[in-house]
Amino acid sequence: MNGNLSPAEEKLLAVLHDVEDAELPLDVVDLGLIYGIRYRESDRHVDVKMTFTAMGCPAMEFMMMDVRERLLREPLVDSVAIEVVWDPPWDKRRLAPRAVAQLGGWGIIP
């Protein structure tokens, strides 16, 4: 994720910690699935770039719906567009340290 986020974008990214992966009890931010977030104050619109751990993820639509619904609960947001991106491909280096610790504790990653 780009570190040049506005305060509104930082807040919106933070609320996405409420959205859990469909298969793991980890959030989409800590899993590294959010590649970008941009907020336009002029029309209260959020653009999200999001990926998944696999192209064939059966829960993609559900997770995008969860991201959209969570952002729309914020008073500063009227609309959300989500772009699914595959470049760069997701890999475990995108995991936040707490996700690495949890997955390691479960024996999922070394």
Image (spheres, rainbow, N blue to C red):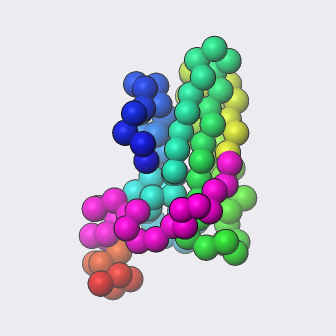
The answer to if 51 sits in the magenta stretch is: no
The vertical placement of 53 against 79, above or below, is: below
Q: Quadrant of the C terminus?
A: bottom left
Q: Residue furthest front?
A: 87
Q: Is residue 27 visible?
A: no
Residue pictured at 58% horizontal, 61% vertical: 87
In the rendered structure, the answer to whether residue 11 lies left or right of residue 77 reads left
In the rendered structure, the answer to whether residue 96 lies left or right of residue 62 reads left
The vertical placement of 33 against 78, above or below, is: below
Which is nearer the eye, 104 or 37? 37
Expressed as whole percent of the image width and height from the top left, the position of residue 103 reads: 35, 75
Residue pictured at 68% horizontal, 35% vertical: 80
Expressed as whole percent of the image width and height from the top left, the position of residue 54 reads: 61, 73
Quadrant of residue 107 in the image?
bottom left
Residue pictured at 47% horizontal, 31% vertical: 9
The answer to if 87 sits in the magenta stretch is: yes
Which is nearer the eye, 68 or 38? 38
Residue pictured at 40% horizontal, 57% vertical: 30
Expressed as whole percent of the image width and height from the top left, the position of residue 41 reads: 58, 17
Q: Which residues are magenta?
A: 83-102
